[in-house]
Image: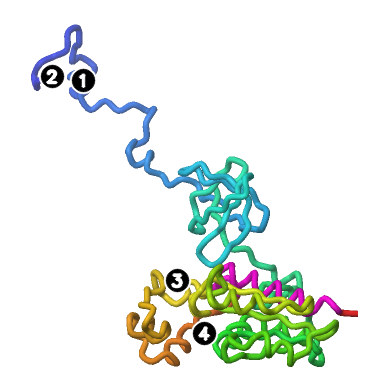
């Protein structure tokens, strides 16, 4: 350390500024006035890439690499080469071809002239609803029917398929017999809580007509087929089996009566992206089945 008044060996004050003579206050032209500030410059912005189906993406923190199979408002699902699927939050933190990107939800450009329906299918401009065909889709109750209408309503009108609400499925085999399914009058049935060993699975086993397709989802009630984040909750509450499920949910969440809770749930659903995959798959299978006799 140099002290004031002490000259460096061999240094003369003659012809020099005092600071230079003492080795103090020397500034190099190689550095900016504030080297630290220069090192704090923000990184260049990362490009936004639509998470289109089939796009291969890597999540570097976990090493997971896969193709996009599903994308909604907040999440993207990636399927690896072994068929395993993992879900990640949509946004930054991904690599595409080794480049850092921000994944965003894909949209159809307005300039393309295409519009998607709530179910994700391409809308047909100017196409009117067709006359109802003989085939039908049955669902369990009013709430199921309203949810199907909200998401698949456009598709149902274009295809001329009527959705009817049942009061449960206890008498399903008898009601199917009365309907008389046949070619051109097929019947699709959507059943809640259709899991192995359940009462519903035993009832469905009694329906054997080749013109009837019964599909279902694993949820106790169709409310559960709505993603929890869609209605602003972390998850659907556990309700004891001796309490009506809707009543228990509304009590746990402070939603009032079941009709008030359902109003909140239905209003939160904008499109297929707000529904769980098992319900989406079940309804799409029914639509394909009841419309396969076209022409």
- Specify which label sits upstream in the sequence, 4 or 3: 3
Placement of the C terminus among the 4 image quadrants: bottom right
Q: Main secondary structure of the magenta part?
A: helix
- Specify which label sits upstream in the sequence, 2 or 4: 2
Q: Secondary structure at mark 1?
A: loop
CB of mark 1 within 8 Å of CB of mark 2? yes
Which mark, by number, is residue 277?
Answer: none
Q: What residue does disc 1 label?
A: 23
- Specify which label sits upstream in the sequence, 1 or 2: 2
Horizontally, residue 35 falls left or right of residue 103, namely left
CB of mark 3 within 8 Å of CB of mark 1? no
Which mark, by number, is residue 229?
Answer: 3
Q: What residue does disc 2 label?
A: 2
Asked whether 280 falls inside the magenta stretch, the response is yes
- The residue mark sitting in front, 3 or 1, is 3
CB of mark 4 within 8 Å of CB of mark 3? no
Q: What residue does disc 4 label?
A: 266
Q: Is residue 67 above or below residue 73?
A: above
Real-space Cα distance between discs 1 and 2? 8 Å
Q: What residue span does the magenta drawing correspond to?
A: 272-293
Comparing 71 with 29, the one in front is 71
Q: Percent position (x, y) of residue 149? A: 63, 85
Q: Is residue 152 above or below residue 20?
A: below
Q: Percent position (x, y) of residue 240? A: 35, 77
Horizontally, residue 168 falls left or right of residue 187, namely left
């Amino acid at each position: 350390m140099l002290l004031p008044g002490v000259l460096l060996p061999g240094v003369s004050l003659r012809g020099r500024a005092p600071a230079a003579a003492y080795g103090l206050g020397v500034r190099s032209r190689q550095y900016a006035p504030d080297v630290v500030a220069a090192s704090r410059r923000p990184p260049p912005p990362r490009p936004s890439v639509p998470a289109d189906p089939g796009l291969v993406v890597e999540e570097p923190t976990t090493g997971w690499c896969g193709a996009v199979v599903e994308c909604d408002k907040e999440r993207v699902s990636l399927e690896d080469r072994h068929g395993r699927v993992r879900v990640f939050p949509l946004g930054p933190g991904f690599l595409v071809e080794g480049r850092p990107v921000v994944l965003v939800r894909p949209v159809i450009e307005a300039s393309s002239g295409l519009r998607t329906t709530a179910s994700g299918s391409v809308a047909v401009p100017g196409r009117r609803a067709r006359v109802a065909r003989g085939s039908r889709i049955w669902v369990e109750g009013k709430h199921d029917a309203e949810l199907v209408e909200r998401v698949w309503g456009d598709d149902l009108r274009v295809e001329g398929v009527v959705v009817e609400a049942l009061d449960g499925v206890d008498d399903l085999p008898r009601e199917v017999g009365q309907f008389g399914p046949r070619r051109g009058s097929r019947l699709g049935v959507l059943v809640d809580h259709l899991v192995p060993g359940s009462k519903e699975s035993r009832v469905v086993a009694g329906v054997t007509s080749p013109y009837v397709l019964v599909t279902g989802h694993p949820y106790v009630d169709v409310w559960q087929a709505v993603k929890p984040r869609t209605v602003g909750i972390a998850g659907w509450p556990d309700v004891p089996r001796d309490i009506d499920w809707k009543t228990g949910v509304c009590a746990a969440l402070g939603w009032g009566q079941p009709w008030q809770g359902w109003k909140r749930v239905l209003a939160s659903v904008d499109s297929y992206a707000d529904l769980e995959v098992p319900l989406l798959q079940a309804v799409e299978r029914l639509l394909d089945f009841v419309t396969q006799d076209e022409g």
